[in-house]
Structure formats: structure tokens, C-alpha cells
């Protein structure tokens, strides 16, 4: 028999394994990734190990390993142990780490809710070729599990499950700088060869403010009860990168010969490569353009002053976690 000091050392090592968090809330919805109903708890408790079927989560395959008598503490109290195992870990690269936030669940037949079990004070665990399982050696005491008063066993069956949230090895890091009044932020642009008889969009030449290219887009309003009664004016970003969203706020002013008759609107929005316009569908009455000597269309040009008031600059990078 080994010396007592060595026995104490072994027990201490076992007790240093992940502990269960006892303060998680219960819930009525079942685990989203896997659930198993085990018939005959009596026979289950005779097994050394129960291994579940394989289930998929986060692009990887997993299974559960339940040891009905997996751990005995220094007082002689017996515990069930439950582990999450990665299937086919040899498919991982030698240095690849799959970080996972996992939870276990047991159904309580009295409250009709799922009791959640999670490691205490730990959010992510790394699975590798060498480390293929994580879990709770003291998942649930046998005494607690078997007692009818606790609701885990009913008619000799039990239900347990798992949720596995895989965290990718890299995450997107984004830095957003919101700039007020960027340099050289006021530009005059004309819609050349503008015609009130043209019902299709007409554009200005591109201009650069805040490091981005822009155009003005104008056309008769074509949606709703006021169709054709207003000039729609939009500020259009050019060449936005995929998955980037950029905020812009600007003043758009249509110039009249009589400057006291200028039409001005403030526009704003979050732009992307799929939604790169912000503006007003009712910028000004269409009839104002067609008034004799109205003063907005001069030598077939409709001129605007664009003032970029606020713009957000975004930088993105991948960061290992």
C-alpha cells in the first residue's frame, strides 16, 4: 500500500479538476445540439462508461462520455462524471486549438426544466490532438441523481444533453474612428446634361472626401403616392469593402441662381457594399425644376454643394485567440 502522503497527493490532484458552477439558471428549452433519453437508469448505473452517439456542432463532431461512478471524493461520496469528447481529433493540425464553451444539461421531471451544468470560472476550453476531452469529474453526486425528490430520474429513465459553442481560432478586430468635419469636406458637383424628361438616374462625376470616393445620384421619385412629384437625391459611396459598414452624415444643397432659394437637406446613414446610398426621396418638388426661370437648371447643369459633416473610418484585422 502506498504511503498516506502519496494518497493525499493523488486525491488533491483529482479535486483540482474543473468544478461545477452551482449558480446557473434553469430553463424550459432543451439543449440545442444534443439530447439523449436513457431508458433503464438501473442498468445505466451498472455500466463503467456510457458513450453517446456522435453529434455535430461548430463544424466539428462530438460525443458525451458518462461515467456513472467516475469519481469518489475524500469523504467517500460518489459522483457521476460527464465529459465532452472530440471525435476524430487526428484531423486537427499539430498546433491547432479548437476553443469551446460547453454546457451540460439534465432534465428535471418535477420542475419540467433543464438544469444547466458548466465549469466554474471558466468560459473556454481548448481541444487539441493531445487534449480531446473536457468535462466535470464531479458532475452530479449519485445520491442526488438517484433521489426521487430531485426529479432527475422518473419511471427509470433520465434525459441529459449538451450545447457546444465553438470559438474560431481567429476573430475580426475592428477599430472605428468617427471623424467630424474631415479635411476638404466641401465639394461642388454638377449633374451635367441634366434633363427633366429623363426618368432614369443621373450622376455627378466622382469626388473624394475622407479617403473615399463619392457620387451624387438624382432621379424622379418613383415609389409611393407621390411618385414623380419630387426630385430624389442620394449620396453614393464608391468601392466600399465587403463586410465593412461606414457611417456618413452630410449636407446636400441644390444651388439656385438666386442663392436665397437654395434647397438643402441633411442626410445620414450606415453604408455598405450592398447598401451604399443615403439621401432623401423627397429632396425638392419636381415642379421647381420645371418652373420657367426656376434657377436650378442652368445650361443643362444641376449643381450641388456637398458637405461631409461626419464620417467613420474603419480598420479591420484578424487576431488569433
Image (tube, rainbow, N blue to C red):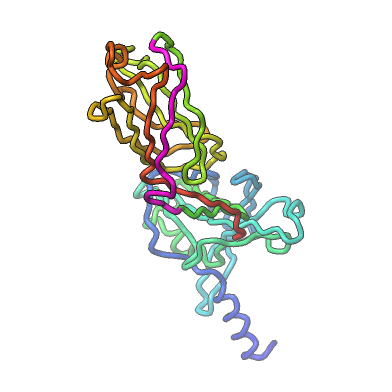
Figure disc tally: 0
In the displayed structure, would residue 301 be above or below residue 198?
below
Q: In this orientation, does residue 162 appear?
A: no
Q: Is residue 95 left or right of residue 266?
A: right
In x, y percent, where is residue 188? 41, 34
Name the residue at 60% across, 52% down: 168
In the displayed structure, would residue 287 be above or below residue 259?
above
Name the residue at 33% across, 37% down: 251
Q: Which image quadrant: the C terminus?
A: bottom right
Q: Is residue 292 left or right of residue 140?
A: left
In x, y percent, where is residue 174? 51, 53
In-front residue for pair 170/27? 170
Task: Specify the farthest residue to the left.
Answer: 260
In x, y percent, where is residue 113? 38, 48
Q: Which image quadrant: the N terminus?
A: bottom right
In x, y percent, where is residue 194? 43, 17
Name the residue at 47% across, 46% down: 210
Name the residue at 39% across, 22% down: 302
Q: Is residue 259 left or right of residue 50?
A: left
The magenta segment is: 177-196
Give yes or no for residue 273 being in the magenta stretch.
no
Q: Is residue 1 left or right of residue 177?
A: right
Q: Quadrant of residue 226?
A: top left
Give yes or no for residue 178 being in the magenta stretch.
yes
Q: In this orientation, does residue 293 appear?
A: yes
Amino acid at each position: 500500500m502506498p504511503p498516506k502522503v502519496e494518497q493525499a497527493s493523488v486525491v488533491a490532484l483529482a479535486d483540482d479538476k474543473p468544478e461545477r458552477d452551482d449558480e446557473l439558471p434553469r430553463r424550459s428549452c432543451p439543449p440545442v445540439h444534443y439530447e439523449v433519453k436513457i431508458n433503464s437508469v438501473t442498468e445505466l448505473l451498472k455500466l463503467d462508461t456510457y458513450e453517446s452517439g456522435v453529434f455535430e456542432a461548430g463544424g466539428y463532431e462530438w460525443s458525451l462520455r458518462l461515467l456513472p461512478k467516475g469519481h469518489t471524493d475524500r469523504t467517500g461520496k460518489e459522483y457521476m462524471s460527464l465529459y465532452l469528447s472530440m471525435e476524430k481529433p487526428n484531423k486537427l493540425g499539430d498546433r491547432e486549438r479548437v476553443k469551446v464553451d460547453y454546457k451540460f444539461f439534465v432534465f428535471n421531471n418535477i420542475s419540467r426544466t433543464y438544469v444547466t451544468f458548466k465549469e466554474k470560472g471558466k468560459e473556454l476550453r481548448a481541444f487539441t490532438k493531445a487534449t480531446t476531452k473536457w468535462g466535470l469529474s464531479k458532475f452530479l453526486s449519485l445520491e442526488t441523481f438517484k433521489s426521487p425528490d430531485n426529479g432527475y430520474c422518473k419511471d427509470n429513465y433520465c434525459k441529459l444533453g449538451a450545447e457546444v459553442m465553438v470559438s474560431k481560432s481567429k476573430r475580426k478586430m475592428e477599430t472605428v474612428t468617427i471623424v467630424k468635419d474631415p479635411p476638404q469636406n466641401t465639394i461642388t458637383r454638377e449633374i451635367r446634361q441634366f434633363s427633366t424628361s429623363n426618368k432614369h438616374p443621373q450622376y455627378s462625376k466622382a469626388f473624394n472626401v475622407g479617403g473615399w470616393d463619392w457620387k451624387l445620384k438624382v432621379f424622379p421619385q418613383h415609389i409611393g403616392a407621390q411618385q414623380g412629384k419630387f426630385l430624389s437625391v442620394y449620396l453614393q459611396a464608391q468601392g466600399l469593402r465587403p463586410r465593412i459598414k461606414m457611417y456618413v452624415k452630410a449636407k446636400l444643397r441644390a444651388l439656385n441662381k438666386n442663392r436665397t432659394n437654395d434647397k438643402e437637406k441633411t442626410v445620414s446613414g450606415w453604408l455598405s457594399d450592398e447598401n451604399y446610398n443615403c439621401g432623401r426621396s423627397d429632396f425638392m418638388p419636381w415642379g421647381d425644376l420645371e418652373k420657367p426661370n426656376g434657377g436650378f437648371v442652368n445650361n443643362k447643369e444641376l449643381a450641388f454643394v456637398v458637405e461631409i459633416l461626419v464620417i467613420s473610418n474603419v480598420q479591420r484585422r484578424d487576431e488569433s485567440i
